[in-house]
Image: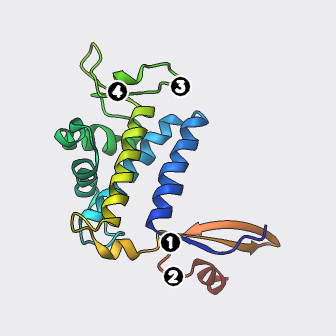
Amino acid sequence: MGTEDKILDYKEFINKVLIDGVDKMIAQGFEYYAFVIICQGIEVLGSFYDSEEIDKYGESKTRFKAGLKNLFKNSFYKQNQDFLFKQLRGNMIHKLRPGKEIILTSHNISKTPLEYHLKKDEEGRRILVIEQFFEDFKGACAKLLTKIELDKDNLDKDKQDVNYLNIFEKNIDNQNVILSGDTEYHTSEKLEDEE
């Protein structure tokens, strides 16, 4: 394989994992799962607005809401943070299905018009069209990266220095495999210590 160890910083993580990864999921027909990753991604973006450790538990709601409030352009996201946390994020992360007040769809596969995004159906459920949701999310990612570059919003400096993901090659049972993991320590060294 011949890959070198690579550590993704926050910019690479946002661009390669959150944007490129979700884009590939949608293009390959895995739009349902893309909703889950976007929800998690909103939390990652929102984490730049607090000074807690990136790994601190119990910050999901605060971070999700901060991501929506500070980075999403459409006012619906800002005005419906609690609704989206409860009906979308919470249900998708914990039950892998939306709450009863939200329905998920796509333009590419289900042929739902993009303009239906965030509108209500005849039963009063909020419609989320993945392609438009993803465009809104990409805009939020771009806005965060710009704010960091311009040093706006008093964003957490420590998170800007954190390495987000370690990608490395390891020989396991005479087979080279590529692994990824936390960057708190060099993951491949830890594997050797545990063997």
**Is residue 25 shown left or right of residue 99?**
right
The answer to whether the residues at label 3 and label 4 have Cβ atoms under 8 Å apart is no
**Looking at the picture, how far across and down is residue 80, in whole percent?**
19, 38
Disc 4 to disc 2, C-alpha distance: 42 Å
Residue 17 appears in the rendering: yes
Disc 3 to disc 1, C-alpha distance: 34 Å
The quarter of the image holding the C terminus is: bottom right
Question: Which of the 4 image quarters holds residue 129?
Answer: top left
Q: Amino acid at mark 2?
A: Tyr
Q: Give the number of the mark in front: 4 or 1.
A: 4
Q: Residue at x 51, y 82 (%)?
A: 185
Q: Amino acid at mark 4?
A: His
In the orientation shown, which residue stands out farthest toward the front?
150
Q: Which residue is mark 2?
A: 185
Disc 2 to disc 1, C-alpha distance: 7 Å
Q: Residue at x 69, y 74 (%)?
A: 4
Disc 3 to disc 4, C-alpha distance: 13 Å
Q: Amino acid at mark 3?
A: Asn
**Looking at the picture, how far across and down is residue 100, in whole percent?**
30, 28
Asked which secondary structure carries label 4, the reply is: loop
In the orientation shown, which residue stands out farthest toward the bottom?
193
Q: Which residue is mark 4?
A: 117
Q: Which residue is mark 3?
A: 108
Q: Amino acid at mark 1?
A: Asp
The answer to whether the residues at label 3 and label 1 have Cβ atoms under 8 Å apart is no
**Looking at the picture, how far across and down is residue 159, in whole percent?**
35, 72
The answer to whether the residues at label 4 and label 2 have Cβ atoms under 8 Å apart is no
The quarter of the image holding the N terminus is: bottom right
| Nearer the observer, 151 or 93 | 151
